[in-house]
Image: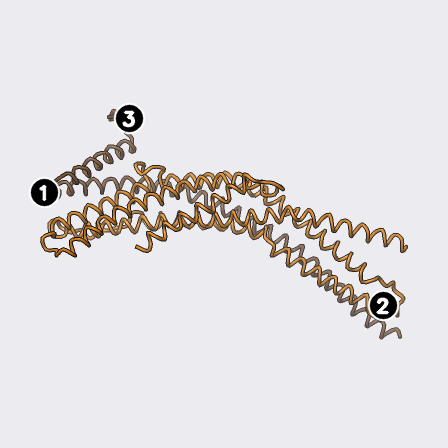
Amino acid sequence: MKKSRTLLLGWCASVAVQLMLLGCATDQAALRIGAFATGVGTCTDNVSQAFIEVEDVHSRAQTSGAIITFQTMQFDPDSIKPFLDPQEVEARMTILAGLKLYAEKLSEVMGNSQLDKFDEQTKAFGESLKKLNASDALKQHGLPHVSEKDLDIFTAAVDALGRWFIDWKRSKEVKAIITDMHPHVVRICELLGKDIGSKRTDKGLRFQVYKDFSDLIRNRSDWIWKDIKKFDAIQKRDEIAALVQLIRDRQTADRTLEGTYKVLSKLQETHQQLGKAFEDEAPNLEDRIRELVGEGKRISEYYKQLKDK
Amino acid sequence: MPDTAETTQDDVFQAYQNLYELMDKAYWTASTIQDKDRIRGIEDAISDILTALNAADIKARTQDYADCKNLVDATNHRLDKLKSQIDSIIHVVKIATQVVKAAEDAVKLAAKFFV
């Protein structure tokens, strides 16, 4: 009886150690998927910002146009409208929020919070077993007593088995979800890419921002030309400096949208590799995640610059 | 220039865009405010056409986004389901702890009762 119990505990200890080693691979996957979620978050925020930026520049161009033509042409209040209707923008914001939520949920499922909860519960289970084992009442009934060390081994094995099962289940399901989601990620990125436009001469937000900035620059130039005689030297200098700054802003905005477009391709490529997050070595995926996060941060800085103006 | 029969919205857009760029160059080359004003007037009209064509192209994709939304929602629902399945595994251990505690109470009570 004692011999078989010793054998069973020995098996438990060995299983616990082996399963703990297996857990390291999913820890890596959790880190990679967590980093991917960060990259997706930044990327979707940047795309949302692109829609906000286009409306902002469009509104500024309309205002400057109205100022220039107010006295010479009949002003039509109906001509002042957003570039896109709110419901068109809303449809894009909803899909971006959905994509961000998907990445966050992936990271949450793969994260440690549920495993920590499980550990907490198995610890409580172990403690209650020890309490029961130490109970005098148990001795009174002549029930067998187990050493505390044996109970620790048993609890560790329960914990390791449970962790292994959770790891196995979530790895299997998450891999399948990533595979099934991939065509939708590709489709969404393609649609958003078309909205932004690959070149500034193609239809899209990139073209619109460039053109609206050009309108803005031309209107400002016209205004300077018309009022130049009224300016003193300092006003003249400031106005021309502001015009040159607008040209720089146009370049920054164009580069920002170009970057936003390119990151969408990176997002697709990274998601395609994401199933490899569960492998011991995934250098290609890790490189792509680093690029996605790095580029996303760089573009966020550009948007911040544009916003601060 | 493409044939009228084959003209697409893209061709129209490209033609207006070329015109807009040429007018923009002309604006910056013009040396009097009168010339600039005239060019700007034409450019403003072209700009409005380009904006309308561009917005229409983007709007045409809105339904595609609505279709994608349902697919993304379904995936997020799958992830929620997986999370709750894992929660239920944790719950099993919680129940086991409660069972052990109940067993301890029962043994204590039995000890008092049978003594």
Q: Colour of chain A?
A: orange
- Judging by the rendered image, the residue that carries numbered circle 3 is B6
| Identity of the residue furthest to the front in this view | A233
Q: Position of residue A112 (x, y in %)?
A: 61, 54
Q: Are dots 3 and 2 on a single chain?
A: no
Chain letter for the part of the structure drawn in brown: B
What number is the disc on residue B82? none
Label 1 amino acid?
Thr
Residue drawn 85% across the image and 68% down it: A138
Q: Chain of mark 3?
A: B
Camera-nearest residue between B69 and B21:
B21
Pointers 3 and 2 in contact (C-beta within 8 Å): no
**Mark 3 and mark 1: span between their CA atoms?**
41 Å
Indicate the quadrant containing the C terminus of chain A: top left, top right, bottom left or bottom right. Answer: bottom left
**Mark 1 and mark 2: span between their CA atoms?**
106 Å
Indicate the quadrant containing the N terminus of chain A: top left, top right, bottom left or bottom right. Answer: bottom right
Q: Nearer the viewer, mark 3 or mark 1?
A: 1
How many circles with numbers are drawn on the protein? 3
Q: Nearer the viewer, mark 3 or mark 2?
A: 2
- Judging by the rendered image, the residue that carries numbered circle 1 is B32
Label 2 amino acid?
Leu
Residue drawn 27% across the image and 35% down it: B13
Label 3 amino acid?
Glu
Q: Position of residue A19 (x, y in %)?
A: 71, 48
- Judging by the rendered image, the residue that carries numbered circle 2 is A138
Identify the mark nearer the N-term, 3 or 1. 3
